[in-house]
């Protein structure tokens, strides 16, 4: 994908985020504060255009999934660090749930107590915050730190994923529900088309990939007696597909029934009632 095409896609995404957030505020007035907060985070992400200079052509000879490890994602450190600070400000000033530890995180970075590059390298290599950064005794909230750092890196991760995904067709077929680009767990499922094709969306790099429609993506169970779904009356076009064999579930958006305008990261957040319901029923996500 060219730089201009990526820039145009970002502009379209900003318009979509604004429109979908407005729709969701009307549909779910009780979630207005949550929607407002995430709308701001997503706007910050798409107002920048990370520069990704890494050559991924070495993947041409790759014969299996995943294509890369998370530590191999290319990151625009300068833009990501600036975004990191802005998200810290958004979290500390969040009227719904202000967190003073966000300010402590930003101040530590500004004072030179933290090296952003080392922090990023550790995060991508270990896939979680390291103890030296997330020690609550230092004023750090580990979950908030993880949230801020991932969302600061997300524009670079998604752009890298677009470049990497071009090599997916040259590899072997999927053997599990994990993302073929980075091995991330799926966030959502999408059902679409007249013949009902099905795909999963990665929770880490947001790559979309096809799966078989008539089996559990997690354990490959295809017994219709043990597969099912749960719908909620207030949630048209979205359901939770579950498997009684492995006791896992995934939220699924049916594009034939769902509203025309949607933005998947926002849909995932505002559909939390499904997660609560499925947890009550004894099912877990991947």
Image (cartoon, rainbow, N blue to C red):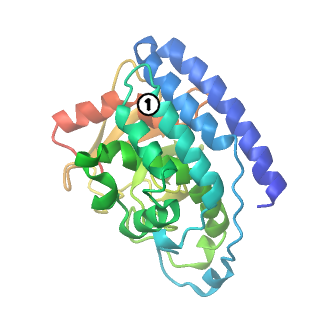
- The structure residue drawn at horizontal position 24% and vertical position 31%, both measured from the top left corner, is 277
Q: Let me know if residue 257 appears in the view.
A: no
Q: Quadrant of the C terminus?
A: bottom left
Q: In which quarter of the image is the N terminus?
A: bottom right
Q: Residue furthest bottom?
A: 61
- The structure residue drawn at horizontal position 41% and vertical position 70%, both measured from the top left corner, is 125
- The structure residue drawn at horizontal position 47% and vertical position 59%, both measured from the top left corner, is 211
Q: Mark 1 points at which residue?
A: 92
Compare residues 284 and 89 and report the one nearer the observer.
89
Compare residues 171 and 230 and report the one nearer the observer.
171
Q: Let me know if residue 185 appears in the view.
A: yes
Answer with the quarter of the image where residue 219 lies.
Answer: bottom left
Q: Is residue 98 left or right of residue 171?
A: left
Up-down relation of residue 150 to residue 261 (above or below): below
Give the x, y percent position of residue 109. Answer: 48, 51
Up-down relation of residue 225 to residue 218 (above or below): above
Answer with the quarter of the image where residue 281 lies.
Answer: top left
Give the x, y percent position of residue 120. Answer: 48, 62
- The structure residue drawn at horizontal position 42% and vertical position 18%, both measured from the top left corner, is 31
Give the x, y percent position of residue 229. Answer: 31, 38
């Amino acid at each position: 994908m060219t730089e201009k095409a990526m820039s145009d896609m970002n502009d379209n995404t900003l318009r979509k985020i604004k429109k979908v957030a407005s729709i969701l505020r009307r549909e779910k007035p009780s979630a207005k504060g949550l929607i407002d907060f995430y709308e701001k985070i997503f706007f910050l992400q798409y107002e920048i255009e990370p520069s990704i200079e890494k050559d991924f052509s070495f993947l041409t000879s790759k014969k299996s999934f995943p294509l890369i490890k998370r530590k191999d994602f290319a990151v625009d450190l300068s833009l990501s660090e600036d975004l990191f600070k802005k998200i810290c400000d958004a979290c500390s000033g969040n009227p719904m749930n202000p967190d003073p530890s966000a300010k402590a995180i930003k101040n530590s970075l500004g004072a030179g107590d933290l090296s952003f590059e080392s922090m990023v390298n550790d995060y991508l290599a270990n896939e979680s915050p390291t103890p030296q950064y997330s020690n609550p005794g230092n004023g750090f909230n580990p979950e908030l730190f993880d949230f801020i750092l991932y969302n600061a890196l997300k524009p670079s991760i998604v752009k890298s994923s677009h470049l990497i995904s071009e090599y997916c067709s040259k590899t072997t077929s999927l053997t599990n529900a994990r993302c073929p680009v980075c091995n991330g767990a799926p966030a959502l499922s999408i059902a679409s088309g007249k013949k009902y094709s099905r795909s999963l969306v990665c929770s880490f790099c947001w790559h979309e990939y096809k799966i078989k429609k008539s089996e559990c993506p997690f354990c490959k169970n295809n017994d219709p007696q043990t597969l099912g779904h749960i719908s909620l009356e207030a949630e048209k076009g979205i359901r939770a597909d579950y498997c009684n064999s492995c006791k896992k579930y995934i939220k699924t958006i049916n594009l034939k029934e769902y509203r025309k305008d949607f933005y998947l990261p926002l849909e995932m957040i505002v559909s939390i009632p499904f997660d609560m319901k499925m947890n009550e029923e004894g099912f877990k996500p991947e």
